[in-house]
Amino acid sequence: MQHQHPIYALLPLVNSPAAAADFVTRATSAPDLFTFAYLLHSPALTQHLQAGDQTKQYIDLLRLFASGTWQDYISSQSSLPSLTDAQATKLKQLSLISLASKSHTLPYSTLLSELSLPDMRSLATLVVSCIYANLISATLDTREELVHVSAVIAGRDVVDKADISRLKGVIDTWAGRCAETIEDLNNEARKVREKAVQESKEVKEYNRTVEMVNKQLMTPGGKDSGKDSSGCEGENMDIDETSPMSDSSGSTKKRKQRTTS
């Protein structure tokens, strides 16, 4: 809870407009305090601020840190107290949260302009400080000069109706991204299922073909089973056992019989 921050232990000690203004300065400078609606709803603090002519502007300063941006400060700087370096850094961090809530892809050029930063190095330092403070989850794309925000961890305070409308817009944007993500996941799941079915069919067809080939190889017989290994017919050939020598011997005997007679 935001009122558990150690600085709020000093709130009961505020007993004058000057003390109230000093308390606001301390709170808005604290490096680990990023919500201020609790202070805006603290009657003791706001009553002391309103009681002093020079301290009324600190209420607007609190409202600025609760839901405003750096550009809001630039446009109304003349009616607000001057910011310390710590306060300026804090407000730029809070402004980065607001920008990240609207878009998860932030060009360097936009951030340099919106946050009045002098160069890329100061921008990188600010983004890294927000990451380490657990305000956002993001990466720096130096090649494309973009900040890719994957999550806005710390939100801004809701102070008035304008903040409610802003918060509704953020929620609607988030819901739209969720719907798109779910649709993408469903499409990917469908593709994976279709690919699995196709691969299953291919495996079954391959196995069926292998099985058929194995059966043909293991079955005896076939149109070539009647041939020997040389490819010749396996039937016995008729051989004429009568030789030319036997014919000539028989003819000689017949001629001798005729002469004797």
Image: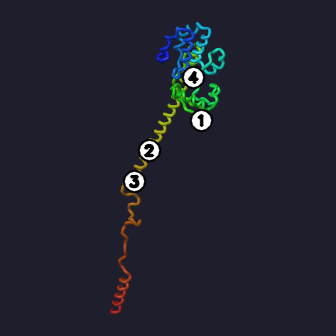
Distance from Cα at disc 4 to Cα at disc 1: 27 Å
Distance from Cα at disc 4 to Cα at disc 2: 66 Å
Question: Can residue 179 be spotted in the picture?
Answer: no
Toward which corner of the image does residue 146 lie, by quadrant?
A: top right
Q: 75 or 47: which is nearer to us?
A: 47
Toward which corner of the image does residue 166 lie, by quadrant?
A: top right
| Nearest-to-viewer mark from 2 and 3 | 2
Residue beneath disc 3: 216
Q: Position of residue 138 (x, y in %)?
A: 54, 30
What amino acid type should be assigned to the residue bearing mark 1?
Thr
| Nearest-to-viewer mark from 4 and 1 | 4
Residue beneath disc 1: 142
In the picture, the disc for residue 243 is none
Residue 189, compared with residue 205, is above or below; it is above
Element carrying mark 1: loop
Answer left or right for 254 relative to 175. left
- Mark 3 or 1 closer to N-term? 1
Q: Position of residue 175 (x, y in %)?
A: 53, 23
What amino acid type should be assigned to the residue bearing mark 3?
Gln
Residue beneath disc 2: 203
Going 36% across and 56% down the picture, which residue do you hit?
Answer: 220
Element carrying mark 2: helix
| Nearest-to-viewer mark from 4 and 3 | 4
Q: How was this image coloured?
A: rainbow
Q: 210 or 73: which is nearer to us?
A: 73
- Mark 4 or 3 closer to N-term? 4
In the picture, the disc for residue 86 is 4
